[in-house]
Amino acid sequence: MAENKRMSLVVFNGTVDKLYPVAIMASGAVMNDMEVDIFLTFWGLMPFRKGEPYKVTQVSKDYDQMGDEMMRIMKEKNVPSWYDTLLQAKELGNIRIHACAMTVDLFGLTMEDFEPVIDDIIGVGEFVDMAGDSDTTLFI
Amino acid sequence: MDKVEITREIDARGSYCPGPMMELIRVMRSAAVGDVIAVLSSDQGSKRDIPKWTAKASQEFIGVEELEGYDRIVVRKVK
């Protein structure tokens, strides 16, 4: 059997409007039997600290004015949280979630500080090697 | 499509992309070969995504029935 296609995501942003596309793109990859490597760096890593995933409500500054309204509509229409969407995709597919070593060191964090959904802490060299071997890479 | 016996129906109405498709994948994993699964979806992506997925996953796409405000999409697990 041919090796599965692969997608890499660099998640730099930690606002809810950026975390949704991360979860949804990862789901799309699972539908296509693609493997996914997600690299969480800087603000993108913060929502994965213990107890944080469901607390993220802030949207990007660019869309700040629409943020409350967006969250209200999502709630009204029972859209699952970005985190539950990501967990479902990870459960059904082959998704690996990596924490950026530099961010972890800079903020004095360890694996203990993160939700168990994070698989490991890796350096940028290892991630770029993964991205280089994958079929598509997105920066979110 | 009327003659096909449905083994299991997933009511994913009100759920947004990628919800219905992911529910289908989950159910297909645990289904037996030969099972026929119907997905009810009000999401506009499903009726395009599901036939594409069945083709790619080498499953059988039986059809789409367009009903009032939602679609009923039927697939058979063949492997």
Image (cartoon, coloured by chain):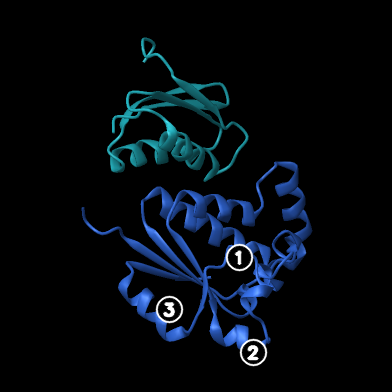
Chain colours: A blue, B cyan
**Residue A48 rendering spot, x and y as whole percentages:** 65, 68
Q: Read off the residue under disc 3.
A: A127
Which-is-in-front pick, marks 2 and 1?
A: 2
- Number of numbered discs visible in the structure rendering: 3
- Circle 3 marks a residue in which chain? A
Q: Read off the residue under disc 2.
A: A106
Residue type of the residue flagged with mark 1:
Lys
- Point out which mark residue A18 bears: 1
Q: CA distance from mark 2 to mark 1?
A: 23 Å
Q: Nearer the viewer, residue A117 or A19?
A: A117
**Residue A59 rendering spot, x and y as whole percentages:** 71, 66
Residue type of the residue flagged with mark 3:
Phe
- Point out which mark residue A78 bears: none
* Mark positioned earlier in the residue sequence (3 or 2): 2
Do marks 3 and 2 share a chain? yes
Extreme residue in the left direction: A1
Do marks 1 and 3 share a chain? yes
**Residue B34 rendering spot, x and y as whole percentages:** 33, 23
Q: Nearer the viewer, residue B32 or B12?
A: B32
**Residue at (54, 80) in percent of width and height:** A100
Extreme residue in the front direction: A112
Q: CA distance from mark 3 to mark 2?
A: 18 Å
SS assignment at label 3: helix
Q: Nearer the viewer, residue B29 or B20?
A: B29
**Residue A130 rendering spot, x and y as whole percentages:** 37, 75
* Mark positioned earlier in the residue sequence (2 or 1): 1
Residue A127 drawn above or below residue A78: below
**Residue at (62, 88) in percent of width and height:** A105
Residue type of the residue flagged with mark 2:
Leu
- The local crowd at label 2, few if under 14, some if 14 to 19, many if 20 or more residues have their Cα within 10 Å, is few
